Amino acid sequence: MTSFRMGRALMKLRRRPWMVKMLCSIVVIALGFLFVHTIFGSRHPQTDKSSAKLVNFKIKPDYMVPYGDNGQADSPQNSSQQHQRQQHQQKQQPQQQRKQQLPPKQQQQQQQQQQQPVPDQSRLQLSQEETKTALVMRERVARAKLYCQKKKNAVHGNTTKAKPPAYAFKPCLLKSRAHGFQLCPIAKIGSTFWARFYQVLRESDSGTLRSPYSVPLKGVENIRCLNENASLPAKGNSRLLKATFVREPFSRVFSAYVDKLISPNPIYWNQWGKRAMKRDGVTSDRVRCGQGVTFRQFLRDVNARLWRENNHVIPMAGMCDPCKESFDVIGKMETFPADLNYIMSKINVTFKRDIKLSRETKLDAIYDSIQGPFGWMNKIKACISTPEMGRRIWRKLQIRGLISSDLDYPVGEKDLTHMTVEEFNNIAAKAHDKSTDKRRLSLQKKRAFVEAFRTLSLDDVRDYVRVYQDDFDAFGYDKTPSSVFTRDGHFVDTEALDFDKPWRIPE
């Protein structure tokens, strides 16, 4: 029966050829769809609806499995398109919504990254400052080498072969092989600070230093020539970082005058003041203790003899000769903070965080200016009164820019015999805290400097340049600065060096 029906159907198809063609087309299309699905459909990952896990591929995190609106995995045919749509939607979503879709482990990693400290901007600035200082150091060292080469050529070309000057003092090198550091200190260029620094450096094993100003002043002299055992090996490298510090030569000699002669100091009044005054023709009855020596008398004595005899005024190139000692670092007093930071970074040490070095430096300078005279009070009283002693101390602090010139000496004619160092120091420290105008304090220092050199003849100044020519050449200082050589009629003398009168500086 079935065969009969099939035969009748075939007979009908033969009578209707268009139907045959249509059926054949349907069969071909169906076979084509089946072939395409067989070939290309296998490239899509198959899913197991019971477990909703990927098959044939390595299992991926849950947030990468495409889901439909009903929360179940999509069919294989639609999974790829759905995944692409989800990626597009995720890009459009806010950042916070995307973080919520991440698995717990990745969310934890992102939180840890967010909690990491932001780079310290001050540290980045310091690194830039260190880079700048490194370039400056190269220029200074190169200049010193060029000076040495010229000096060597001049010696070879000189048939007379003049002997180098014999100095009465040689500095003691501060050497720390444990930290790979060696300094050649020069008087009037922070030598007391460096002696203290060396002491705290010797004590440190961790690389974190206490304040150098915690070292008492009385113990500094015993430190100056103290060196570590030369047989101790340096950490990682036997080579030492060799450094020295220099200063503008005119500024250095003026600092020596203020610190040793304007300030009450019977030792230097006797050693420098008396001889300078006698050399200038002052009679013995007026010389007395030597406390009345002027800057002109002092500088002439420096040019005549002191430049060979005393470490405070011996030429810097004679104290720490760059031609005999190949320095890696040539620091300058004018850039002391940056140069100090550079050295500390090179030897891998740092100060404790709570140390405010700039303020400690100023307060220590005030205390040092007071402690010495009070300790010599009996000798000082044989030469001057204690009120004059106080005024001299006060003017020294004003010239150094530590106390404003607007603040007059507050003690008046009171006898300082019964006043303690601490009491006078507290008065000076309070005055320092009131002196907040940095521009004016800087102006004070410049005015005192200019007025001191205005008392000299240009011949005296040229003699000084001739004596200290090596310092100017080796370390790159100007031999003819306008502040020293300019002589005009518009200059107003404020009598900065007259400590008996109030100091008033015109605006």
Image (cartoon, rainbow, N blue to C red):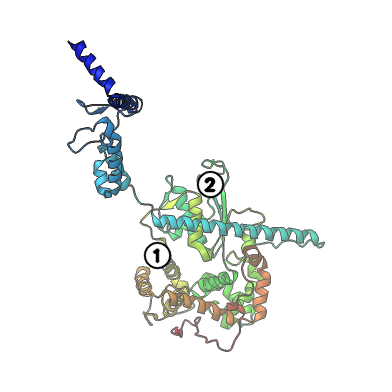
In the image, 45: left or right of 307? left
Q: Label 1 crowding class (10 Å Cα cut-off): few <14, some 14-19, many 20+? A: few
Q: Label 2 crowding class (10 Å Cα cut-off): few <14, some 14-19, many 20+? A: many
**Residue 49 visible in the snapshot:** yes
Task: Tell me what residue is drawn at x 52 percent, y 86 percent.
Answer: 493
Q: On the image, numbered disc 2 is attached to which residue?
A: 180
What is the x, y in percent for residue 367?
A: 41, 67
Q: Report the amino acid beneath label 1.
A: Arg
Q: Is residue 507 above or below residue 366?
A: below
Q: Report the amino acid beneath label 2.
A: Gly
In the image, 314: left or right of 507? right
Q: On the image, numbered disc 1 is attached to which residue?
A: 359
Q: Secondary structure at mark 1?
A: helix
Out of 241 and 280, give the one closest to the viewer: 241
In the image, 339: left or right of 109? right
Out of 425 and 99, give the one closest to the viewer: 99
Q: Secondary structure at mark 2?
A: loop
Task: Tell me what residue is drawn at x 29 percent, y 38 percent.
Answer: 81
Sequence-first tag of 1 and 2: 2
**What residue occupies the far front of the structure in this picture?**
15
Q: Is residue 453 above or below residue 131?
A: below
Q: Is residue 478 above or below residue 15?
A: below
Task: Tell me what residue is drawn at x 24 percent, y 43 percent.
Answer: 100
